Amino acid sequence: MTKIPVDVDLLFETSWEVCNKVGGIYTVLSTKAKNLQKVYKDKVIFIGPDVWSPSNPSPYFIESSTILKSWRTSVELPQGVAVRVGRWDVPGKPIAVLVSFDGMYAVKDELYKKMWEHFGVDSLHAYGDYDEACAFSHAAALVVESLYKHLAADSHKVIAHFDEWTTGMGLLLTKLNCPEVATVFTTHATSIGRSICGNGKPLYDYLKGYNGDQMAGELNMQSKHSLEKAAATQADCFTTVSEITAIECEQLLDRRPDVVTPNGFEPTFVPAKTKFKTCRHAARQSLLETASALTGKQFGDDTFIVATSGRCEYRNKGIDLYLDTMNRLRATGVNHRVLSFVMVPAWCDKAREDLTEAIAKRNFSGLENPVITHTIHNFDHDPIYNRIRSLGFGVSESDNVTVIYVPCYLNGNDGVFNLSYYQLLIGLDATVFPSYYEPWGYTPLESIAFGVPTVTTSLSGFGQWILHGFTDSFETSGVNVVERSDSNYDAVVDSISRSLSFLISSDGSVRELISRQAMATAAKANWSLFIDYYYEAFDIAFAHARQRNQEK
């Protein structure tokens, strides 16, 4: 049942990924924006970091000289903090404020002292991106305070929503400086949970035995964990994106999220039916021609194209398992051309000149090192590249399974494909996301939205959503969820290999059915349905804010 939208006078949402595409949170916010804008119009203001320059402008930001003009002409911000106002160039085109924050580094010690005294945040062990995140969220909190006082002073219908530990300082400062504002904090993945997995420790078998504070000390994560835990504790409403992460939060952050807010998708990203076949054909041609130019092999129209993608987290995202699955598939003697892509951004240098020249001249005789499309700065140390080579891919021309590494952001300007990820995704026959640590899992949801069947695991939030709401099979949902644990790696490799063999051997009518079922499943995750969870979160935030203000 659709929930009635909560009445708000002003809704802020702050994230490092506003107009700044880094990972999955960008997809969450940019696709959610249309529904928020539809309900709240320009009462929604997204706040992100101004990490851009005239020579490297944000491709997602449209600056405006008229939006919030009265505020911009009167706002007083500290030296070294400045704002640019415009619209985020995504469906809904919400207002976006980009904040530069260099001036905040000079006062970070004062900020850290205040956060220790009021909330017990331990910034003593800070390193890496901690200072940068806190400088940004400090500046963002000043912008929230200024806009609140300018646009909705004394209103008790204002919400400030902060995403991830990187904005935790902003939430805590907002609570101190603007107690009337209701705060929401969303952790999309706990910093300590991700660190446990990234360090090769078993998370799931031993979760109930882990203490978040103790593990933070062991893994040198004290500051990030302390900040995230304080934000989760102090927020008027604490949310996360899946039940599997809610359990993790309760154990490691000592607070059960008030609401689980699963991540939806915006169907406007999918081409209309009249353009679908044309777009799919163009994507396949680009993928097949690139592979032929690299390898010298001939890939016909019936080539089965599969891919994995996402952030470069070799173990957490299951990239290691994906490559071993390709090796297992090859070992089974599959009697069909299989073209397998690893679309994972790395420390990319540039498009290979020999490859771009071969594509331009339609020279399909093959190149040296036929397993990678771009040069990278760290060939010797890149785990994906080295695993591909150690498995022997790119050596035998007779292999029916070909693996190609695409180590760049597919933003439409990569130099080889010059198509965006979505423009290439539509050309695939299947995707595989065998995640070990995946609080939600946008990539499999994106895949089925384009009618591309996907394989994921029971350790992803999306996989759990499928298991609890659908029949787990390609023919009924377009999704195959493989059971994964801390100790069944080889079984997962075998299971996914068999799943792909099934798809490869299926005839056209079965594949068309699976594609339709995939799209039907994705439609049940549209933001028009999932936005209701946010209305519930806003309700809870307002109730808790009223209560704590009355208790003062």
Image: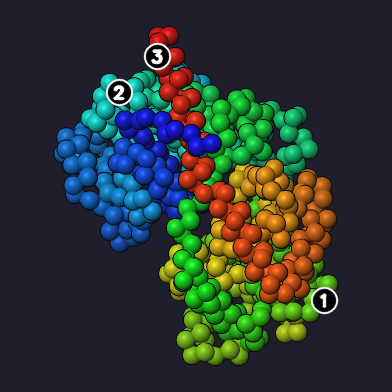
Specify whether residue 13 is in view.
yes
Q: Residue at x 56, y 58 (%)?
A: 449
- Which residue is at 68% across, 72% downward? 509
List the single residue furthest toward the front.
1
x then y, percent, for residue 524: 57, 49
Q: Nearer the viewer, mark 1 or mark 2?
A: 2
Which badge, 2 or 3, comes first in the chain's sequence?
Answer: 2
- Give the amino acid at mark 2: Ser
Query: Which quadrant: the C terminus?
Result: top left
Q: Is residue 287 above or below residue 325?
A: below
Say the numbered circle drawn on residue 304: none
Left or right of 62 in this view: 461: right
Structural crowding at the residue carrying mark 3, measured as other residues with C-alpha within 10 Å and reported as few (<14), some (14–19) or many (≥20)? few
* Helix, strand or loop at mark 3: helix
Whole-Å distance between the Cαs marked 1 and 2?
Answer: 67 Å
Decide: few, some or many residues near mark 1? Use Cα within 10 Å; few <14, some 14-19, many ≥20.
few
Q: Point out residue 192 in the picture as x, y percentages from the top left corner.
A: 62, 36
Closest to the observer: 10 or 129?
Answer: 10
In the image, what residue type sits under mark 1?
Gly
Q: Nearer the viewer, residue 201 or 179?
A: 179
